[in-house]
Image (spheres, rainbow, N blue to C red):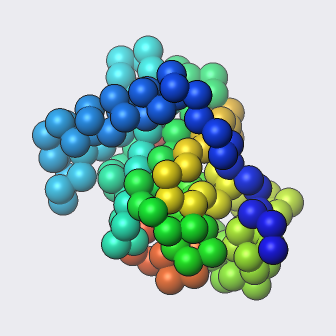
Amino acid sequence: MSHPFPAHPVLSGLALTAITAFAALVHAQPATHAGHPPAAASAGTACEASIEGRPGKRFSTQEIRVSRRCENFTVHLVHTGRKPWQEAGHNWVLARSADIDAVIADGQRAGPERAWVPRGDARVIAATQMLSGGEHASVTFPVSRLRTDERYTYYCSFPTHAEPMRGQLVLVD
């Protein structure tokens, strides 16, 4: 079976250096939320966040803050493990918290051909492709899709990962 939503298999030296530098920076950040530093758009200047999908079914952070001042927001995901996506893939999927259980259930029915994400489902605000260890992906979505009166949850859709690999996306400012 081919890799659903294939990631970029060849990294340029510059991209690899940037990922390595980011990983070092993340590990140097002080822990503030249950051992996980929040990823944030700082002072309206950064409309992006980076997050790691780690072995042990966990994300590097469980909260991402998005400024309403951003037109678009980009999430960069790095899978820090070594296993292929078929054994322990990671992705990043965003939906309203009120919809999360139904989105996960429908995704499981969609199966591996769809990376366990229901394609064309308006409840899915954004999703990266499923990654194997060492791969990276980014997804950008318009901040206008987020409402201040809603709660948002991100998760990994790989089977058995959705419960432990969750976090909150918070609209701020």
129 over 22 or under it: above or below: below
64 over 20 or under it: above or below: below
Q: Residue at x 36, y 18 (%)?
A: 43
> Where does the image place residue 67, in percent across and percent down from the top left?
46, 28
Q: Residue at x 52, y 39 (%)?
A: 76
Q: Quadrant of the N terminus?
A: bottom right
Q: Residue at x 42, y 61 (%)?
A: 81
Give the left or right position of residue 35, taking residue 68 as reference. left
Q: Quadrant of the C terminus?
A: top left
Q: Residue at x 42, y 27 (%)?
A: 17
Give the left or right position of residue 38, taking residue 142 as reference. left
> Where does the image place residue 70, in percent across and percent down from the top left?
55, 23
Q: Quadrant of residue 145 in the image?
A: top right
Q: Is residue 19 visible?
A: yes
97 over 48 or under it: above or below: below
What residue occupies the far right of the structure in this picture? Answer: 120
Q: Is residue 65 visible?
A: no
> Where does the image place residue 51, in percent across and percent down from the top left?
42, 46
14 over 134 or under it: above or below: above
Give the left or right position of residue 125, taking residue 100 as reference. right
> Where does the image place residue 58, in percent across and percent down from the top left?
36, 65
Q: Nearer the viewer, residue 158 or 87?
A: 87
Task: Please count the marks in the image.
Answer: 0
Give the left or right position of residue 63, taking residue 162 as reference. left
